[in-house]
Image (cartoon, rainbow, N blue to C red):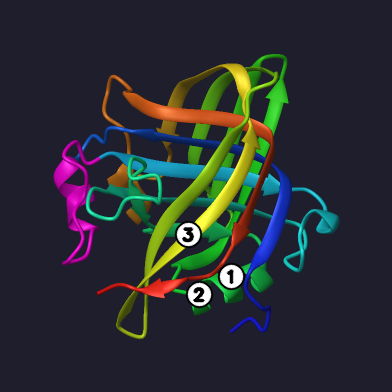
Amino acid sequence: MSDLVAPQLVVNSRMIYFGWVPADPDAVAALVPDGLKPMANRQVFMNQYVVDRPEQTSGFGAYSLTYIGPDLEDAYAPDGVTPGRWWTHYFNSSEVVRGYAVARGAPATPGRTTIEIDGDTLVATTEADGVPVIRTTARVGRTGTAVNRGQLRYVTEVDGRRISGNYPFVAEPVDPFEVVSLEFLEPGHPVHALRPADPLQIVWGFYSPRSSFAYPGGESAMG
């Protein structure tokens, strides 16, 4: 268990964050625990990001992370529009961050995420225990004057108690942005249950080379 004190701040991470309609809606719904409700289309979210330097965090140090799971219909963010989210997988490169996350209900396991850009092509690769399991290819432009900001809601479970956490964020998205392909590379890995439908149906998303946010680590118990 990490002894870091909540909240923790991360600034200027490189982040690609988007959602899609899954190939197997029933498999996605099966990952949502009793008492929570998946979206009608069973849409899935995924955030792949990299924090390059320790100076970008209040205590985590440099790390990379991919987290993924189903959007929730009955646990909206404070704006009343953005779905709440349930983590099913949380591939993190830092033992420190994994300890912090596990103590607050995240299913954190060892993993590594890389984001590489060549011209207007971005490739984000997620590894689990050294094995590539997800690869995203996107077409990206440059940042302009637009800013995404608000709070997201993630639901976790700690010692049998369901916890709701609000996570404030500010991100500068690029334009244009398009997810070209999303590949789940290991059919035998449990994360394969969240693979996208064919043809790919992206429901929202952005890439930001400067995305900042706070980790409160759980804010209140749900009824």
Distance of mark 1 from mark 2, alpha carbons? 6 Å
Which residue: 36% across, 85% down? Answer: 159
Q: Earlier in the sequence, mark 3 or mark 2?
A: 2
Looking at the rendered structure, the kind of residue marked 2 is: Val
Q: Are marks 1 and 2 in contact (CB under 8 Å)?
A: yes
Magenta span: helix, strand or loop, mainly?
loop
Residue situated in front as seen by the camera: 213 or 119 = 213
Instruction: Report, in whole angstroms, how far the alpha carbon at label 1 lies from the one at label 3.
Output: 19 Å
Question: Magenta residues, as a range?
Answer: 25-42
Give the secondary structure at mark 3. Answer: strand
Q: Position of residue 108 (x, y in %)?
A: 50, 67
Q: What residue type is labelled 3?
A: Asn
Quadrant location of the C terminus? Answer: bottom left
Residue 59, horizontal then vertical, whole percent: 76, 68
Q: In which quarter of the image is residue 118?
A: top right
> Which of pointers 1 and 3 indicates the residue nearer the eye?
3
- The three-letter amino acid code for the residue at tag 1 is Arg
Q: Name the residue under label 1.
A: 98
Q: In this view, does 183 lie to the left or right of 141?
A: left
Q: How crowded is mark 1: few (under 14 residues within 10 Å), some or many (20 or more)?
A: many
Residue for badge 2: 102
At horizontal 38% and vertical 68% (from top left) the residue drawn is 156
Q: Earlier in the sequence, mark 1 or mark 3?
A: 1
Q: Can residue 189 be seen in this view?
A: no
Closer to the eye: label 3 or 2: 3
Which residue is farthest right? 55
Q: Is residue 11 left or right of residue 100?
A: right
161 in relation to 13, above or below: below
The residue indicated by pointer 3 is 166
User: What residue is at 29 percent from the left and 55 percent from the top?
Assistant: 75
User: Within the image, what quadrant is residue 32 found in?
Assistant: bottom left
